Amino acid sequence: MRIAVIGAGVIGATLALTLVRRGHEATLIDRSDGAEAAVTGNAGAFAFADVIPMATPGILRKAPLWLLDPDGPLSIPPAYLPRIAPWLARFWRASWRDRYAAAVAAQAALMALSQAALERLVVQEGLAPFLRREGQLQVYEGEAAFRSSLPGWEERRAAGVNFHLIESAAALAEIQPGLAPRFTHGGWTSGWINVTDPALWTRALAEKSGAARLRAQAAGLRIGHDGIAVDLGGDAPLFDRVVIAAGAWSGPLARSAGLSLPLETERGYNTTLPAGAFDLRTHLTFADHGFVVSKIGEGLRIGGAVELGGLKRAPRMSRAEVLLRKAAGFLPGLVTTGGRQWMGFRPSMPDSLPVIAAAPRDPRILLAFGHGHLGLTQSAGTAEIVADLLEERAPSIDIGPFRPTRFAGASR
Ligand SMILES: Cc1cc2nc3c(=O)[nH]c(=O)nc-3n(C[C@H](O)[C@H](O)[C@H](O)COP(=O)(O)OP(=O)(O)OC[C@H]3O[C@@H](n4cnc5c(N)ncnc54)[C@H](O)[C@@H]3O)c2cc1C
């Protein structure tokens, strides 16, 4: 089959490699050299333990406090509020107990598949040198913060995640020396995996695939009996199958396949510091502050947080500065100079679950986007599911929770 994959971010690149290895002819279409992709500057974590969606029960009590704090983990530019309101309403509905529990179960199944698929890919393609297996330490300030995190840890345990809980600063320091004394408790996930550099990882997958490359903006799809034409401005090459994997920009392409979906972007910010900034021993998560510190190449990346501000608004790099300032307080030895700031667009559905499915109107069009905070993590599993769908085989997990029509009014 001639298959076009629109978007050479981590979902598209992993899929192209999977398809080529299964004997298909794949063409990767991307308008940029990768610089725009959210994966380029992300934190590099295969966060298989992160099965808890963003919309947790009780989120409505916490969110206003976060919004009122200018240094908090969530911000919404006031002018964007009317635009994001319908998405927020769905986000709130996703936090209700029944849907939340279903989302955790769906996320756990996709995580298990993705982890197994990643390990297969690493062996098959000799990718071990791209990975760090140094665990993840999630830290809390004091007994009360730790206690309130426990239900989340219980949910992880029920989902099969292995971890152990830590109740002293001395035990934290054995894993990560140099934390401020305010951090007294933690959760340690020893099996956690990071990639040495998510941009290099993605490029390596695309190159290994040997897929044909087209540097062009896909403006839409035209459905015909003899194939699907991808409108590239002047040109409109014809394919047997087309996969939309354009991250946060997938909305207009999905519309040309007859779907109007609540895809938004959670903008995230970070700063990458040069080598020698801090002796980081593991992937460090400050969960109550919404940011992480990870090793990237020889340096360190400090960032996360969420800004619901759409795709067009200019970045507010003060958000990255806030996180760096906080990190300097949490890691007193941190050298904060010489950093490079970045903002990226997470492709986010209100229930934190991706869309992975054949388009209802025409199953020759496949959808693979909306992975939110977890696109790198879920890339290998997503690629196996989409390849199965293309081959008209049943995927190895239930993909019902990832159908595009799960939101009322999603299908035209
Ligand atoms: C600060 C931050 C930290 C993160 N940390 C992590 C992490 O540690 N672990 C994790 O799993 N996830 C993380 N994420 C999320 C992750 O980066 C995204 O979920 C992931 O990049 C989504 O992959 P994608 O391939 O769908 O989209 P992208 O990586 O954004 O790639 C989309 C590609 O599509 C192309 N494109 C778009 N529209 C068109 C068009 N019309 N025509 C042609 N090409 C088009 C773009 O140029 C781009 O290259 C983080 C995100 C941010 C912002």
Image: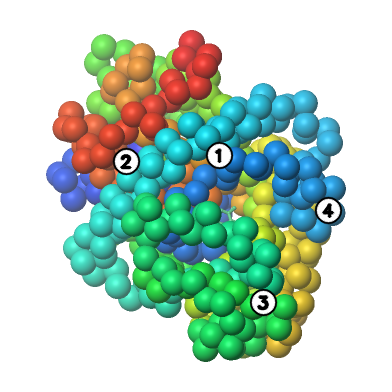
- Residue that label 3 marks: 183
User: Label 2, on which residue?
Assistant: 27
The foreground one among 181 and 129 is 181
Q: Residue at x 59, y 40 (%)?
A: 57
Residue type at numbered disc 1: Ser
* Residue 206 visible in image: no
| Mark identifier at residue 69 | 4
Question: As shown in the figure, which amino acid type bears the numbered disc 3?
Answer: Phe
**Would residue 207 appear left or right of 183 to someone viewing this image?**
left
Q: Left of 309 or right of it: where is 304?
A: left
Q: Earlier in the sequence, mark 1 or mark 2?
A: 2
CB atoms at circles 1 and 4 under 8 Å apart? no
Query: Mark 3 packing: few (<14 Cα in 10 Å), some, or many (20+)?
Result: many
Q: Secondary structure at mark 1?
A: strand
The tag earlier along the polypeptide, 2 or 4, is 2
Query: Which quarter of the figure has residue 79?
Result: top right
| Label 1, residues with CA under 10 Å away: few <14, some 14-19, many ≥20 | many
**Foreground: disc 3 or disc 2:** 3
Which of the marked residues, 1 or 4, is nearer the chain's N terminus? 4
Tell me the mark number nearer the camera, choosing from 3 and 4: 3
The answer for how far apart the CA atoms under marks 3 and 1 are is 31 Å
- Secondary structure under the numbered disc 4 in the rendered image: loop
Residue at the image point whose x is 69% and y is 61% from the top? 289
Which residue position holds label 1? 348
> Residue 306: x, y in percent?
67, 49
Circle 2: element type: strand
Disc 1 to disc 4, C-alpha distance? 23 Å
Labels 3, 1: front one: 3
